[in-house]
Amino acid sequence: MKLFSFRGGIHPSARKERTQDLAIISLPMPARLYVPLQQHIGEPAVARVVAGDPVVRGQILGGSVGRISAPVHAPADGTVVEIIEFASPHPAALPVTTAVIEVSAIQSPWVAPLEDPFSLSGAELAHQIQQAGIVGMGGATFPSAVKLQLARQHRVHTLIINGGECEPYLTCDDRLMRERAEQMLLGVELMLRCLGAEQAIIVVEDNKVEALTNLRALCSDPHYSEPERIKTVSVPSRYPQGSQKQMIQSVTGKEVPAGAHATDLGVVMHNVATAYAVYEALVVGKPLVSRIVTVGGGAVPRPANLEVPLGTLVAELLRYCGLEDDNYERLLVGGPMMGQWLPHAQLPIIKGSSGIIALSEAETQMDLPSPCIRCARCVSVCPAGLLPLEMAKRIRKEDFSAAQALGLSDCIACGSCAYVCPSKIPLVQYFHYGKGELQARKQQEKKLDRTADLASSKALRVEAIERQKAEAAALRKAQMAAKKAAEAAAQELLLSQSKPEITPVSSEERGD
Amino acid sequence: MANTLISGPHTLASATVSRTMLWVMLALTPATLWGLYLFGWPAINLFLITVVAALLFEAGCLRLAGKRVKAGLFDGSALLTAWLLAMSLPPWAPWWIGVLGSFLAIVVGKQVFGGLGHNLFNPAMVARVALLVSFPLQMTLWTQPAALFSAQAPGFIDGLAISFGGAALANEAMHGALDAFSGATLLGDVKTGFSLGSTLSDLLPEGIDHGSMVIGYGSGSLGETSALLILAGGVLLVALGVISWTIPVSLLATVALLALLFNGINPERYPGVGYHLFSGAMMLAAFFIATDMVTSPNTVVGRLVFGAGCGLLIYLIRTWGGYPEGVAFAVLLMNALTPLIDHWIRPRIFGRDRAFRPLQVTSDVVSKEPSAKGEHA
């Protein structure tokens, strides 16, 4: 299959050697789980349990609301101790509604669904994927069913399965493709069915030799797949290969136009771990309640690829891997390129947590930024074709519209620019700030527009009321005039009959 | 934790500004050592004076601006600027040329613009041009090479006298001695000859001595004589990825093409490719001066245009201008055009055309069958 390339990119040292050959092991079930009801992009799930409720695993803890949302399930049998606002794995440890579960000693087994998932229609499959709470597990956490439904409507012909895993340290997808490829392929098959698409292409970076060999063998095995229906391709290891737009370009040679979606090109992309979650939900009957997490970084004595129940605290993973007492320089969730800094380890693992990286002092650079020397390395590595140095200069001056005119909204925040910057300028932070300000401005404008709308509709309303009043007054006046005329006529009549006993009541006497 | 950066990436490449500057200086070292050896003690004095003065000016400016002095000095940019300036000076120039040059480069050329990264013009070239225009006599007093420790070379004390005593011009006793050493550069000789109506074969009856130009055993600026050593350093920087190949290649190719063209038209009036490429400051300009990151464009195409513009201007000035060498003027003129080049030449943004409009959604490429898109429109 002919492959293409994308612009720019970098080659950070992969640092996968410590975990890439370690088999996935299950983390022992912790005593308590902290399951946030928002683990996805979109509306948070709404609690369906209250403190004191016993739960069985797979039971819905929070139901999805709205179009873009996902339910959250109990990862273990136990009791809901409380529903609290608990810190989420976010740089600011923002509190979100969280169900705290006291885990029982005995866990019930998963029960496979009665009906064969391959007998279901596309819409039914999408519905079940929605019910299982599956979201994009590469880190984006967008509800997968929404993405699949959208792709169904667009009649996409190709499903791209992202096995790129271009972030340094992370090996969870690599292990999945090596150890659980058959199951993952079933998930891919189910997704293909759901989409009604012609083919699936599994894209793997060429540094994952075993995963590639394994998948290629399975794809060409008629036992697993119709010939040519699911293909595995190898792409050069280059960050950000795993970014959706770049991977689509690598496979199709096409750029997703600005403001458009992959589905407009007839393709949709899902992560390998998402495909595996689809298999687990539809074949095993296990909704998304656990995931594989790479625990790595120089500060971790025994790094590992762990299968972890969602809601497990990061500290438990670190302790399991031999790291006690916050003995690290910097803690991250996700990879070091696009992952997020964590202020502490008392935060739960959620659906999008692909890795927990504890960096040692030697791995952490704390250089203060120095002035930009316009070396333009950022320009040559930017996969979006932007001018990071120029955008940062504008944002520094708070000239956000100028930064926008240079394409700020087209930035994918991959961090390649900041990675190569010899002046150590935190370019990504500038861009986040700039995007945030633009967003705030847009909202402010919306607010102003709304205020203006309300003001003008109020004016219209007042005008209408005034008009009604005036009309009513005019009507009354007319009626009164008519009445007066009638009375006058009556009087005249009486006068003409020469019986002047009846005197008409004057308006002053009537009105009060 | 207060100053922990919370935005990624959390892993960074090892390149730093000071490391970049260090590589450039390392690449300059062979040519510099050769120049210092060739022109002896007065050249060593001039080099040291220029560098020390530049560091003092830099420190003073950083202090005045309330910036981190140590960090500013250790980024190596002032040192490199002074180094490049010294390499472009006449090797026996008096001490105050070095000091004034450093002042012009660091204070006027760089710090008044806001310091590192903010200057529009190449600081070393600002200084060189200002000196050349203000002190044409001192800036065109070239000396024949007299290798260090050779019989005719001035000793350490004589060197001090030349550098600090104003011996080169004022001291009558030294004047005669100096006269013995002075000699025009090849470019200067040829330029003067042409202006008097001579042809190339009149001026250089034995032909152009390319060997001397390449190895660098001729009179000229302190560090510009050996085209070979400068080229070697430049190629090293390109190979290491410290500088990009774009400007050197487009600059040298433009000069070579023009030289080839005009030499073909009239070889007696227009010297050939080798004469232009290996003489004067050509190699230094191509690899070390025009490639200054701060003052050159930030895209590949922009740099190709910039290099070609430098090459064109150098050839024009050398051939038809009033000065025998045009490198400094050419680079400064192209520096002035850099913001314009950067404004016009930008990379195409992903998913957009060059006019910033979103790309049109086109039919599918992966699909083997005609797309089903029409059905759901």
Image (spheres, coloured by chain):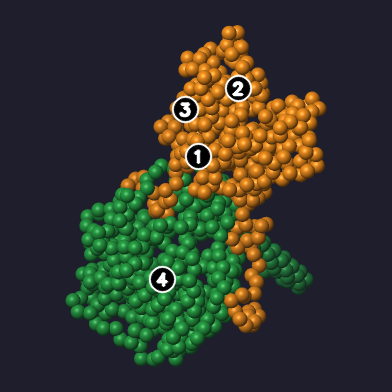
Helix, strand, or loop for circle 2?
loop
Give the quadrant of the N terminus of chain A.
bottom right
Local crowd at mark 1 within 10 Å, few (<14), some, or many (≥20)?
A: many
Q: Give the residue type at disc 2.
A: Thr
Q: Disc 4 or disc 2, which is closer to the eye?
A: 2
The tint of chain A in the picture is green
Q: Give the residue type at disc 3.
A: Leu
Q: Disc 3 or disc 2, which is closer to the eye?
A: 2
Q: Chain of mark 1?
A: B
Q: Give the residue type at disc 1.
A: Ala
Residue position for label 4: A209
**Where's residue A350, x and y in %?**
35, 67
Instruction: State the CA–CA distance, disc 1 to disc 3.
Output: 20 Å
Quarter-wise, where is residue B179 in the image?
top right
Residue furthest toward the top? B172
Whether marks 2 and 1 lie on the same chain: yes
Instruction: State the CA–CA distance, disc 1 to disc 4.
Output: 40 Å
Q: Chain of mark 3?
A: B
Q: Disc 1 or disc 3, which is closer to the eye?
A: 1
